[in-house]
Structures are given as structure tokens and as C-alpha cells.
Image: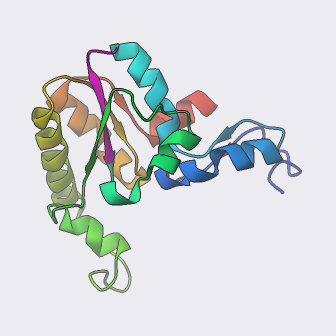
Amino acid sequence: KLQTMGCRAIAAECGYFAYFQKDVAAAVGVPVFMSSLLQVPLAQQVIGPDQVVGIIAARASRLTRAHLAAVGIRLDSNYVIGGAQDDGRVPEFEHLWYEPNRPDPPAAYYDKTEAEFVGVAVDFYHAHPNMGAMLLECTGMQPFARTLQREIDIPLFTWGTLLDYAY
């Protein structure tokens, strides 16, 4: 329907939509950008094989091998995965997305969320001294990308950079 309406590209907003990349791309005649994870192979080439791309997913356990393979990530290649919410260190995300912690209406404090998320991401970076680039899987992480990049000073790939490519 989007293509018939005149859309020249289709982008999805959740990194986990990677699972649908091949099917949607096969079904339409316009470029398809289903997941920020499409950028991992590019990031791997930019940093070379001796460094890793750190992938921060909302929850690492929900990012499956099928998601990775669907966007062209070689499963035996140079990446590591962490989960921003895996250890409860970003409770403000929980207030936005997950019952029973989500109020009605969903709400979170920006400054608190930024501090929580950036802290987790910086710790993830420091846990992998050979990290040469980082990718933020979740669109909810995008608002904190500039602050994070100032802290870690490596290439950072996000939903926003994916949209730049699409544009």
C-alpha cells in the first residue's frame, strides 16, 4: 500500500523488524530499511576484523540469530551483543514499554533515561576494549546518540543514520 501511495522507500522503526527485511524487500519495488541492524556489515567493514561492533539491543535475549542473518550479518563475525534493559539498569525504558511498570499514559523522564542508558552503553563499551563501532538497535535509544558518542568517541550507528542512508 505504501508503494502504491508513492513512497520511494519504506523504513520500519524497530530493530527487531530485521526478521522481516528479506520478505518485505521481496514484496515491493522500492528500497526497504526494516532495521538499524542493516548497518552492522558496513560498520564491520569500516573497523576491520580485529575490532568488534557492539550491538546494544533493548533486550539481548530477544535479538536472535535469525534477526542477524536476515540483514546480512555473518553469525561468526566480529560483533558482540548487549542488552540495555537486561540487568534493570534502565528502568525509565520499562516505564515506556513494559507492563506492569508502564503507567497510563506511558511516561519517562528524559534526563534520567539519558543518564541510565548512556551509563549502560559506556559500561558495555569498556567491557569490550576492542570495540571499534557501536550500533543502537532500538529507536528509543536514538535521542541519546549524540551524548553517547561524546562519551565513547567511536563511530555510532543508529536508526537515525539508517534514515540518512534511506534519504
Outermost residue toward the right in this view? 4
Residue drawn where x is 48% and y is 50% of the image: 15
Q: Nearer the viewer, residue 65 or 149?
A: 65
Can see residue 69? yes
State the residue at coordinates (28%, 26%). 52
Q: Position of residue 13 (x, y in %)?
A: 53, 53
Q: Is residue 54 magenta-colored?
A: yes
Residue 148: image quadrant is top left
Say left or right for 149 vs 45.
left
Range shown magenta? 49-56
Residue 50, image x, y percentages? 26, 15
Q: Dominant secondary structure of the magenta stretch?
A: strand
**108 sits left or right of 66 in the view:** left
Residue 68 belongs to the span the image colors magenta = no
Q: Residue at the location (11% across, 42% down)?
A: 123
Depth check: give the residue in front, 83 or 79.
79
Quadrant in which residue 75 is drawn = top left
Give residue 83's position: percent from left, percent from top.
Answer: 26, 53
